[in-house]
Structures are given as C-alpha cells and as structure tokens.
Image: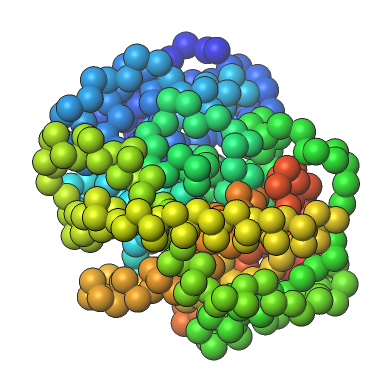
Amino acid sequence: MAATGSGDDGLIDSVGAFVPGPRAVLRGAGEGPLAGLAFAIKDLYDLAGWSTTYGNPDWARTHPVAAATAPVVQALLQAGGELRGKTKTVELAYGLTGENVWHGTPVNPKAPDRFPGGSSCGSAAAVAAGLVDFAMGSDTGGSVRIPASYCGTFGIRPSWGAISLAGACGLGPSFDTPGWFAAEAGVLERVGAVLLPEDAMPGATLGPLLKPEEPWLNALPSTVLALAEPFQRLEALLGPAMRIGIAPEGLPALYDHFRCAQAEEAWATLGGWIAATQPEFGPGVRERFEIARTMDPAKAAAGRAFRRGFTARIRALLAGGAVLAFPTSPAPAPKLTATQAEQNAVRELTMGVTAIAGLAGLPEVTLPAGQDGGAPVGLSLVAGPGRDRALLALARRAAAALGLPE
C-alpha cells in the first residue's frame, strides 16, 4: 500500500457527511481494481490510530482509538481505493432517519428538506453529493437500503455472513451486514468483486422476475406510480413478472417479529455498556434501547421462531434463481419537520419491507429508479443467498435498461 497520511485533504464537505474534526485520509495501493476511486467509511469501522465514535460522544470517550483496521477497509485500500474519511452514523446504528444531534444530521443532497435516512446517513450523503465514488455502510434493519433510496444512490445489503464484520461495531449480530453505496452501478459491482466471495453457482443468470404484492400494496400510491415505468422496463429486460404473495401474515407481522428479535440482540450486544456508562442519547435512540432492555423474552423467542419458518419459505422460493422486485422504501424520506410520531409511523411501514431480506439473510440491491414529489425512491432487487455477484451483474444490466448511471 502506498504512503499514508491523515488530516483534512482539502475536500469541502458540502453536506456535512463526514464526522467533525480532522479527517482520516489514506492512499491505497498504487494499482488494483479500485484504483482511481475515492471512498469513505461509516464511523463504526475501525481504522488504526483513529477513534471509532459509533455516532456517540460517550462511546468515543469510553473506547480507545482503534489498534487495527477492519479487514473490509483494508481490502479496499489494498485494491487501490483512496480513503477520504469517516462518515456520520445514527448513534449506535439504531435508527432509520439519519438524525444525529451530536455530530449534526447530514443534508440529503437530492432532497434537502428531507432526512437522509439511516443509520448509514453520512455514507449515503457523501455518495449522493459526489464527494466520493463509493462509501461503506452497514445494514441491520435497512441502514444501507433506506438511505440509498432516500438519497437516490445505488446500494447493496449482501447476503448475511458473506463479508466479515470483524473490526466493526455491532448492533444485532445475526442481522448485521456490511454494505455500500455508489453513484454508478458499475462501481457498486467493482466493489463487490473485491469484497464478495464467489457465488455458489458462478456465472448463473437470475430470473424469472417476481412481483410480491405485499410491499407494493404497502407503498404510497405516489411511490408506486413513480416506480411503475421503471418496473415495466425491468419486465422488458427479464420478461413479464409473476405476481405472488410472500407474506400472508402481513408486513406488520414481519416488522413485529423482526423488531423483537433484533431488540433482544441489540441489548445483549450493547446493554452492558449502556448500563455501565449511562450515555446521553438523542431523540428516539434512548427510547429504542429502553424497549430493547425491557423486551419480553417470549416475544423475542416468537420472533426467532417466525424467522426460521420465513427464511425457509423465502429461500425455497428463490432457490432456482428467481428475483423479487419491489419498492425499497414505501415512501420518500420524511420531511425534516416530521414529528417523532410521524417518523415512527414511517419506520414501521418501512421495516416491514426491509425485514423481507433482513429476516432471511438475503442480498438486496436498490436502484435509484424514481422520483416521488421531487424526492428519490428506490426499486429493490432481491435474490437467494449466495447470489450476490449475479445480483450485482443484474443491477448493472437493469441500470442500463432504466437509463441510470452505469
């Protein structure tokens, strides 16, 4: 790897995407598949010699600077990528709006009057503003997919367990996965070629296209309308979609089971530190951790049991290479003036959809396919586990068919 440096690299952070203070800058290897590309990392990945704040000043205060760099970041540097800094995250990655009262909430470059989405808010904003070519986030309950949809970028949540999260702060270990944003489908795929293992069936193409009714019925009519033409173009590429149902229990049931299982893990992962430190949290975060602390074990157990059955059902449906396509988020990003109650309502509608891939550990790519009321909305493609590279290749083909940046 080439020489390294640190501090402000002169890049003007026009949207407040980066963590305040001196900026970590590292030059990658002189050549490699990512040479010439600049990237950023969500501030839950360790970078040797730098603090990992996890979006909260008390976390930064009670943890030493990182002694080693997370393997996923090291791989990007070794592939020639140039690190431009660490990006903001919702505190402890537990939120979907992207708000952070300590570091400042990043501006949504594509809809400045709306939230950027979270928890990987800074990474999405940095890519959407053109500050970097791609940026690493993480996704537990939608933390890459939703900000990508809100900010109008490409984004991927890989198959659970496909990429190591060593050297990264955890929230719900059986749901957590790294993910990344890019302004172009080809760049999204190039990063995947560096980070992802070979598919279980290398070279296999995906299809047929499936249109699950529940997430389409869950979306606002205006969002459905915004994605109607992009979906038709997708059908022109892959053939007419088969209309199916995937959640007879209803998306609210998926949300509830996901919420309970995730909350139990969140408290098991972070509860000890919270109890010992009594950290200050911003709006909504403390409430979510309080719910996690008091989660009924029977509800969490029911969530885990439901997850096993749902996973078996969805994986069997996609085992032959079929692909689901549906709105990534049921609506564009909430306005910055939205009340906490309004934000919570959007969260519930949204996480019923993100739970589809989240519960079953599936790869999901979101395409910046539409505009609803002048704000971006994404179209998601979901494949069976271990088909991540094929899904990225399909996303690049779909981008070309939809007239999106390739």
Q: Is residue 356 visible?
A: yes
Drawn side of residue 105 relative to residue 147, left or right = left
In the rendered image, residue 248, in percent from the top left (x then y), is placed at: 62, 77
Q: Give the mark count.
A: 0
Measuring 11% from the left and 41% from the top, which residue is drawn there? 278
Residue drawn at x 80%, y 68% as measured from the top left:
209
Q: Dividing the picture into quarters, in which one does residue 310 lie?
A: bottom right
Residue found at the very far bottom of the displayed protein: 221
Q: Is residue 258 left or right of residue 247?
A: left
Q: Is residue 250 above or below residue 46?
A: below
| Residue situated in front as seen by the camera: 56 or 402 | 56
Model colouring: rainbow
- Up the image or down, 104 lies above or below 2; here it is below
Instruction: Name which residue lies at 87% across and 72% down.
Output: 239
Q: Is residue 279 above or below residue 213?
A: above
- Front in this rendered view, residue 13 or 102: 102
Q: Position of residue 360 (x, y in %)?
A: 61, 54
Query: Would you say residue 143 is visible in this rendering?
Result: no
Q: Residue at image x 51%, y 67%?
A: 254
Q: Position of residue 212 (x, y in %)?
A: 69, 74
Of the pair 290 and 27, the residue shown nearer to us: 290
Position of residue 109 measured from the top left corner of the image (x, y, whole percent)? 40, 60
Residue at the extreme front of the image, as rendered: 298
Left or right: 315 with respect to 272?
A: right
Q: Quadrant of the N terminus?
A: top right
Residue 153 appears in which quarter of the rendering?
A: bottom right
